[in-house]
C-alpha cells in the first residue's frame, strides 16, 4: 500500500470534485435544441420510457429511470443482457427507449437496438461520442462527453457518470415543469415520504375509534374517569349521558387542577369536571398536518373526529397529538 500523507489525500479529493465541476460546467453547452427535441419525444410517448445501460452506465440509467418515474414521467430500467433473454417482454410498441453508453459502442446495447427498432420505439441516446455507432443509430443523441475522467488512472467512470446523471436530472426536471407537475402529484408518488404524509395523510388513518375511545358516562365518579384515562393512555375522557349524547370532555389536566382545589374530587362525578361543552373537532378527511396546526393554535393535545359534521353524540374517533407526531409529518 502506498504511503500518502493526509494533505495529499485531501488534494486528491479536491481535484476529483474540481474535475467533475468542470465537466458539469461544460455540459451546459449541450442543453440545446436537441435537448428540447428529446423532451418533446418523451412528452409524445404514450407508454413508458425504457431506460437501459450496462455497467456503471447501467447504474446511472437505473437512477435516471427512477427520477423520471418519481417526477411524473412513467419510466422503467431494463438490463440490456436480461432484455435479450426475455425481459424485452416488458417493452411495448408505445414506449420510448433511452439508452446510456459513454463509449457509444457498448456491445449489449448494440444487440438491443434492432429489437427496439423492430418494435418501432423512438431511441434517445446519452453518449460520450456523438460519432459512435449508438450515437449514429439513435433517432436523437445527446452529448454527455467530458474532457477527462476524475480517476487518476483515466479509467474508472467518474466525471462521465456525473455528467450523464446530471443530463438525466435536467431532462426529468424540464419534463416536470412542462407537465405542470405539482407538489400534490409528487406526494401521490411518494406516499411514504414526509411530503406525501403532509399532503395525503388524514386523521381517519391514525385516529382512535370503537373500543379504543375513552368514553365515560356523566355519572361516572372521577376516580373511575382517571382509571379510564390511564387505561386508554390518551390523557382525555369523552363524557356522554345515558342516551350517548355528548356532554363534553375531561382532560388529565382538568383532574390535576381540580384536585388542587377540592380534596373530595375523586368521589364526585364526571360532569363536575367538564370544562368545555363544545370541544374542538375535525372531520375524518382532515389532513393530519392541519389537525396538528389546530392543536398547536389552541394549545390542546387532542381533537374529536366526526365522519362528516359535528353531532351531539359519541364521536367517530379521537386523534391525539402524539398520533400525528409519530407519523413524521413534521
Image (cartoon, helix red, strand yellow):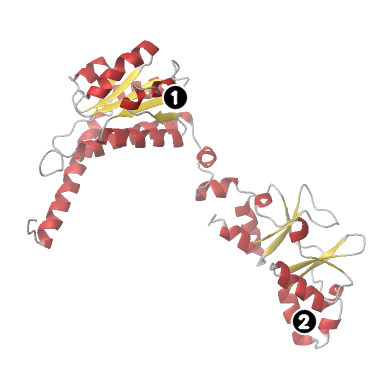
Residue 124 lies, in percent from the top left, at 32, 21
Give the label on residue 48, or none.
Answer: 1
The residue closer to the viewer here, 173 or 297, is 173
Alpha carbons under labels 2 and 1: distance apart: 65 Å
Residue 264 lies, in percent from the top left, at 83, 87
Q: Is residue 210 above or below residue 56?
A: below
* Element carrying mark 1: loop
For marks 2 and 1, the one nearer the N-term is 1
* Residue in the picture at 38% in, 16% down: 121
The residue closer to the viewer here, 35 or 156, is 156
* Residue in the picture at 52% in, 47% down: 192
Give the label on residue 258, or none.
Answer: 2
* Residue in the picture at 79% in, 56% down: 315
* Residue in the picture at 79% in, 71% down: 275
Q: Give the residue furthest to the right.
A: 243
Task: Decide if residue 179 is on the left or right side of residue 149.
Answer: right
Q: In the rendered image, is residue 264 in sight?
A: yes
Residue 60 lies, in percent from the top left, at 30, 36
Report the label total: 2
**Rendering quarter of residue 98:** top left
Q: Is residue 151 above or below residue 262?
A: above
Q: Residues within 10 Å of mark 1 (few under 14, many from 20)?
A: many
Q: Nearer the viewer, mark 2 or mark 1?
A: 1
**Rendering quarter of residue 301:** bottom right
Q: Residues within 10 Å of mark 2 (few under 14, many from 20)?
A: some
Amino acid at each position: 500500500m502506498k504511503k500518502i500523507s493526509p494533505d495529499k489525500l485531501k488534494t486528491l479529493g479536491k481535484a476529483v470534485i474540481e474535475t467533475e465541476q468542470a465537466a458539469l460546467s461544460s455540459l451546459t453547452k449541450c442543453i440545446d435544441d436537441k435537448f428540447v427535441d428529446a423532451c418533446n419525444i418523451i412528452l409524445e410517448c404514450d407508454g413508458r420510457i425504457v431506460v437501459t445501460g450496462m455497467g456503471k452506465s447501467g447504474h446511472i440509467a437505473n437512477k435516471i429511470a427512477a427520477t423520471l418515474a418519481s417526477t411524473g414521467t412513467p419510466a422503467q430500467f431494463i438490463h440490456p443482457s436480461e432484455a435479450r433473454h426475455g425481459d424485452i417482454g416488458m417493452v411495448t410498441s408505445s414506449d420510448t427507449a433511452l439508452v446510456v453508453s459513454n463509449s457509444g459502442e457498448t456491445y449489449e446495447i448494440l444487440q438491443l437496438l434492432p429489437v427496439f427498432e423492430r418494435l418501432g420505439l423512438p431511441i434517445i441516446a446519452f453518449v460520450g461520442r456523438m460519432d459512435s455507432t449508438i450515437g449514429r443509430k439513435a433517432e436523437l443523441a445527446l452529448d454527455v462527453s467530458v474532457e477527462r475522467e476524475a480517476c487518476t488512472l483515466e479509467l474508472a467512470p467518474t466525471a462521465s457518470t456525473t455528467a450523464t446523471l446530471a443530463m438525466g436530472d435536467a431532462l426529468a426536471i424540464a419534463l416536470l415543469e412542462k407537465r405542470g407537475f405539482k407538489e400534490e402529484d409528487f406526494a401521490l408518488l411518494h406516499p411514504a415520504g414526509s411530503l406525501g404524509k403532509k399532503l395525503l395523510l388524514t386523521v381517519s388513518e391514525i385516529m382512535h375509534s370503537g373500543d379504543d375511545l375513552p368514553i365515560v358516562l356523566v355519572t361516572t365518579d372521577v376516580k373511575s374517569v382517571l382509571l379510564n384515562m390511564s387505561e386508554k393512555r390518551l390523557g382525555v375522557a369523552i363524557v356522554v349521558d345515558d342516551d350517548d349524547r355528548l356532554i363534553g370532555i375531561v382532560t388529565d389536566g382538568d383532574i390535576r387542577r381540580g384536585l388542587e382545589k377540592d380534596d373530595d374530587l375523586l368521589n364526585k362525578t364526571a360532569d363536575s369536571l367538564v370544562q368545555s361543552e363544545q370541544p374542538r373537532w375535525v372531520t375524518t378527511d382532515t389532513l393530519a398536518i392541519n389537525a396538528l396546526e389546530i392543536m398547536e393554535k389552541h394549545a390542546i393535545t387532542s381533537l374529536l373526529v366526526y365522519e362528516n359534521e359535528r353531532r351531539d353524540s359519541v364521536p367517530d374517533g379521537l386523534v391525539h397529538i402524539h398520533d400525528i407526531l409519530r407519523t413524521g409529518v413534521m
